[in-house]
């Protein structure tokens, strides 16, 4: 929805703009950069209400200007994106969940390269939901887990990722009965996360698992801030780092994570051997962010 219109994605490779009082679309974007694949997701920019972004089955992410009824730019990724959400506080940034088990953040001014890659899932990322603060987002995946990623540290921006943003989830939620997650969303006070899964249940999670529910006294708040400061001060120590970052996950996720690590090492070793035994200057190492994007189309 925008102010007085809404947009729909269609299987006939088009994006339509509608007025609630009319039975036919106001504008239809067809022949999107020559593609005839299904458009799966469309989202309005939260600040610039004339800007649309969409994901399609041809692995594309496209931008549209509704004022001129024109398609602006499109980037083709190595695998298909399942979801797209704009950052509510920095609306030039958006996050996508991909079939390659990763989530990516993009700057709409430079679609040729993601600003950050967020890893950890062992199956396709099906849903992304931003916190109202714009500093973190939650992802729901086909691997039956919900993960929370921070995109910046205090004082940084989402475009210039801070030192606390490692691309690894700060928290992982799962239950024995929860199945594949297809929808996640933050509450407006950014203290809770809602998830909808394949077992027909909606679950409510705390955004920070150890946070007390309800009003804190001044003494409790001071004690909490002191403990957090201690963790930040000594997090470089191996013992503290292990305790602060360790999370219990199901056995099959541990196995899949280990398998993915071995496969990544094999690919890196193979690429190193190719560079090592090729003519100097003909082969080089490819940046992981560059591998995610195949090409951009204007």
Image (tube, rainbow, N blue to C red):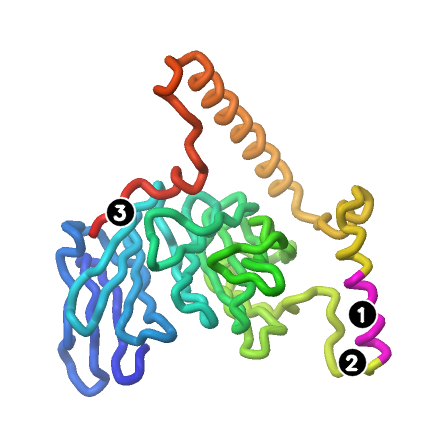
Instruction: State how far apart marks 3 and 1 are (Cα).
Output: 47 Å
- Residue 23 visible in the picture: yes
Magenta stretch contains residue 45: no
Q: Where does the image place residue 85, in percent across and percent down from the top left?
A: 41, 64
Residue occupying the point 33% across, 52% down: 111
Placement of 30 over or under 66, stated as above or below: above
Q: Which residue is drawn at 33% across and 67% down?
A: 43
Eye-nearest disc, 2 or 3: 3
**Pointer 2 and pointer 3: residues touching (CB < 8 Å)?**
no
Locate residue 286 relative to residue 48 in the image: left or right: right
Q: Where is residue 128 in the image (x, y as percent from the top left)?
A: 47, 61
Q: Which mark is residue 18?
A: none
Q: Is residue 224 magenta?
A: yes
The percent coordinates of residue 292 (x first, y second) are 39, 42
Left or right: where does residue 161 sit relative to residue 17?
A: right
Q: What element carries label 3?
A: strand
What are the residue bounds of the magenta stretch? 219-229
Counting residues from the start of the chain, the first of labels 2 and 3 encountered is 2
Quickly name the residue at label 3.
296
> What is the crowding at mark 2: few (fewer than 14 residues within 10 Å), some, or many (at least 20)?
few
| Separation (CA) of disc 2 from disc 1 | 10 Å
Q: Are marks 2 and 1 in contact (CB under 8 Å)?
A: yes
First-in-chain label (3 vs 1): 1
Q: Characterize the magenta stretch by its predominant secondary structure.
A: helix
Q: Residue at x 66, y 41 (%)?
A: 251
């Amino acid at each position: 929805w925008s102010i007085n219109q809404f947009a729909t994605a269609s299987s006939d490779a088009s994006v339509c703009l509608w007025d609630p009082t009319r039975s036919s679309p106001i504008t239809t974007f067809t022949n999107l950069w020559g593609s005839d694949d299904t458009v799966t997701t469309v989202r309005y920019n939260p600040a610039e209400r004339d800007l649309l972004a969409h994901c399609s089955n041809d692995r594309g992410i496209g931008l549209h200007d509704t004022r001129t009824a024109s398609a602006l730019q499109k980037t083709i990724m190595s695998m298909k994106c399942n979801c797209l959400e704009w950052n509510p506080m920095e609306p030039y940034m958006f996050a996508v969940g991909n079939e390659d088990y990763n989530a990516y953040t993009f700057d709409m001014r430079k679609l040729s390269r993601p600003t950050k890659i967020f890893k950890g899932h062992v199956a396709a990322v099906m849903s992304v939901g931003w916190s109202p603060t714009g500093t973190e987002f939650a992802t729901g995946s086909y691997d039956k887990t919900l993960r929370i990623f921070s995109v910046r540290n205090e004082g940084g921006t989402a475009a210039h990722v801070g030192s606390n943003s490692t691309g690894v989830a700060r928290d992982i939620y799962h239950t024995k009965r929860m199945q594949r997650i297809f929808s996640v969303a933050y509450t407006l006070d950014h203290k809770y996360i809602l998830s909808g899964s394949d077992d027909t249940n909606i679950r409510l999670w705390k955004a920070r698992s150890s946070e007390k529910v309800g009003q804190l006294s001044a003494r409790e708040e001071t004690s909490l801030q002191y403990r957090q400061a201690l963790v930040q001060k000594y997090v470089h120590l191996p013992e503290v780092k292990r305790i602060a970052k360790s999370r219990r996950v199901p056995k099959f996720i541990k196995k899949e994570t280990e398998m993915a690590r071995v496969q990544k090492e094999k690919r890196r070793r193979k690429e190193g051997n190719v560079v090592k035994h090729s003519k100097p200057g003909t082969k080089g190492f490819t940046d992981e962010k560059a591998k995610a994007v195949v090409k951009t189309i204007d």
